[in-house]
Image (tube, rainbow, N blue to C red):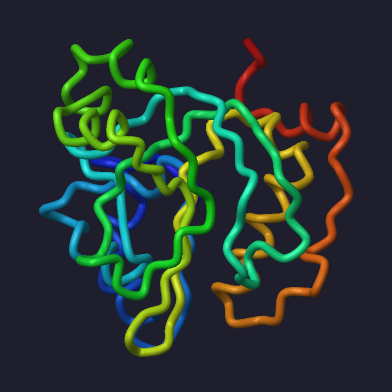
Amino acid sequence: MYCDGFKRHMAKNHQNEIQAWVDHGVGVACLHFGVEVEPEDLGGQFLNWIGGYFEIGWSVNPHWTPEFNDFPEHPITQGVQPFSILDEWYYHMRFQPEMKGVTPILSALPPVHSLTDRSKDTNRGSNPTVLAAVQAGEKQHVAWAYERPDGGRGFGFTGGHFHKNWQQDDFRKLVLNAIVWTAKCEVPEGGVFSRTPTDIEMEANQDYPKP
């Protein structure tokens, strides 16, 4: 699900269908705004489906440029080289208690100014808990894999705000690997190959005139 989140999340009208698929072992992957849901409506389901979610008043959504230099040994990271890219990387997700079943895939320490610059926005800009965590030097997880107790799989990825970022080969490979892994298919040793989209291809199929 790569979609609007919070009150407009596509899962709101399909909870029972998705739960039925999950009960049969189907994997769930959510990207960017698709990881944000209303806690009272879908928070519990998202903890069970993908292991975590963006919780308003707890999580934040600044634009910043993390450097991803170290990756865990996991099928999702196969063939992925270190990279750094500006995006609206959400962080301080609401995860399963004690991170049970959750494997952080992309982690970095955000700059403190990513919170202080937006401190007046207490919904998505900053809050005392996340500020204390960043000031204490706690790396924040912006992509993660989840193995459900029933054997199903989930994946959350908070980047994806800027369309052009899909031209970055390692950014794209990591997400393709994750979708393959979530579907319980085998990720190639060097990761899922895809050709870099051209500028013309990236400009194609616009729903609205480009600003």
- Residue found at the very far front of the displayed protein: 136
29, above or below 3, in the image: below
Quarter of the figure that contains the C terminus = top right
Q: Is residue 89 left or right of residue 51?
A: right
Instruction: State the image coordinates of residue 54 (x, y, percent, origin top left).
Output: 29, 45
Q: Is residue 45 visible?
A: no
Pick the front one: 97 or 30:
97
- Residue found at the very far left of the displayed protein: 40
Q: Is residue 156 visible?
A: yes
Instruction: State the image coordinates of residue 163 (x, y, percent, origin top left).
Output: 64, 31
Q: Is residue 159 left or right of residue 39?
A: right
- The residue at 41%/40% (across/down) is 33
- The residue at 77%/37% (across/down) is 167
Q: Quadrant of residue 62?
A: top left
Instruction: State the image coordinates of residue 28 (x, y, percent, origin top left).
Output: 45, 68
Instruction: State the image coordinates of residue 85 (x, y, percent, origin top left).
Output: 64, 31
Pick the front one: 128 or 168:
128
116, above or below 145, in the image: above
Q: Is residue 76 left or right of residue 45?
A: right
- The residue at 34%/42% (across/down) is 138
Q: Quadrant of residue 190?
A: bottom right
